[in-house]
Amino acid sequence: MVDLSTISITEKAAEKVKYFAARDNMETFGVRVGVKGGGCSGLMYNLDIASEAQPNDKIIEEHGVKIFVDKKSYVFLAGTILDFSDGLNGKGFTFHNPQAKTTCGCGVSFSA
Amino acid sequence: MERSPLFELQRRMGASFGEAFGWELPWAFSNVLEEYETATQGVALLDRTYTGRLKATGKDALDLINRLSTNKLEDLSQGQGMSTVLTSNKARILDFFVVLRLDEHLLLLTSPQNRQKVAEWIDRYTFLEEALVEDITDTTVMLSLVGPKAPDLLKELAGMRLEGLSLYHWINASIGEVDVMVIRTDCAGVTGYDLVIPANDGERVWEAILQEGSDLGVKPIGMETLDIMRVERGVPLYGRELSEKINPLEANLRHSISFNKGCYIGQEVVTRLDTYKKVQKHLMGLVVESDTVAKPDAKLMMDGKEAGFITSAVRSPALGKHIALAYVRSAHARAGVKIGVASEEGEVIAEVVELPFSS
């Protein structure tokens, strides 16, 4: 059941965020998600492990991990589930966004 | 309707006015044949203040606009510029404009009717980037010097030899004791330079040009002559050849597309159309074989089926004929094809030619 009022993170993705933060010896951390213009369909996803939130960020917490998202990106990401797939055919961090109307052939860009 | 700060001065000079792009503009100062000769043999002065001028500041502005348009803007150094197409995700043309790199910011020269659309589009795709767009059209004036003697005139006015200034490169100069930005743009398809001037100094520079350039025969010209010149040289105009129904490959804008720069909005569609040769129509020239002036939007017919449409039509002094720019379906888009043009007098025959027209 998609909750369009928030952004969620799966347990697997949360564990991966914690792994990267520990690897970089970060005392405080969160995962910054956002949207960037460009990419063949119009928008691209941005993901970063950040030490703290920015002043106007929305902060969501799940599975022990904070998600930081700027307000403008949040409009396009509401309802998104951040997941992680590993292994040989794994794509790494992936965004499942119910708002994405079209995507490009390489899967990197979307429009909403 | 908008007016240039030089409107009153031009009215006093006897210009006749007309409307284009939501502006009241000088249509002609003398007669078309005289103005045409001045612009193609000597040097002519044009007021192109109606062109959109947007100032983009912020360290991410160049990267952002690079991601939203077709050309490789990341290659630009200070003093350089390039043309680029702002495309939708379906590779339709939102605008065709020039980006100039200055020391602390970028200057965008947009189509006149699109300056707000371009600013809003860039803002829409600005998230965490440090990038801000400001419309400076109302605080500046833009005058153009066009014709083969334009470099000679600039040497007299500004003491600089500018023949070697490459297309869309720019320098600072002083004309009539006013600091102006001189940009090589060849706007009508002939040698030409745009001068960007603070609005309050527009009249002063206009008068300095006419006075100091009198020995070179510089004269002001209007929109009617400009339109004839750009049609003869196949220069597309937004609202005629360019619109959100057209993609850049159809419109002969290949020179403004980078095929190796990576992602931008619409990139996949442009590449696919190009790779699989799926471009369905091409911008071509038409020479109309009768005295009828073909009209914009007139349909083209081949064997009873629609084969395209006209976008602009003028009478060419150089060719002594009626000519047009038209989108022609790919199957017929080659020189020598005879095609029917629907007109009030019935169908007239035109010959498809490559652009630019040659006399």
Image (cartoon, coloured by chain):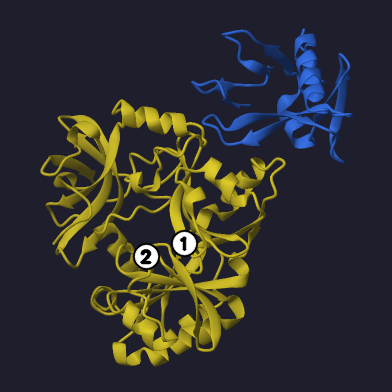
Quadrant placement of the N terminus of chain B: bottom right
B70 w.r.t. A61: above or below: below
SS state under label 2: loop
Mark 2 surroundings within 10 Å by alpha-carbon count, few (fewer than 14), some (14 through 19), many (20 or more): few
Q: Chain of mark 2?
A: B
| Coordinates of residue B208 in the picture (x, y in percent) | 46, 89
Label 2 sits on residue: B166
State which quadrant residue B42 falls in: bottom left
Mark 1 and mark 2 in contact (Cβ < 8 Å)? Answer: yes
Residue drawn 18% across the image and 35% down it:
B332
Residue drawn 57% across the image and 33% down it:
A42
SS state under label 1: loop
Count of numbered badges drawn on the protein? 2
A100 w.r.t. B42: above or below: above
Image colour for chain A is blue
| Coordinates of residue A11 in the picture (x, y in percent) | 80, 10
Mark 1 surroundings within 10 Å by alpha-carbon count, few (fewer than 14), some (14 through 19), many (20 or more): many
Image colour for chain B is yellow
Residue drawn 59% across the image and 65% down it:
B103
Of B181 and B8, the residue lying toward us: B181
Residue drawn 52% across the image and 62% down it:
B78
Q: Chain of mark 1?
A: B
Specify whether residue A9 is in view: no
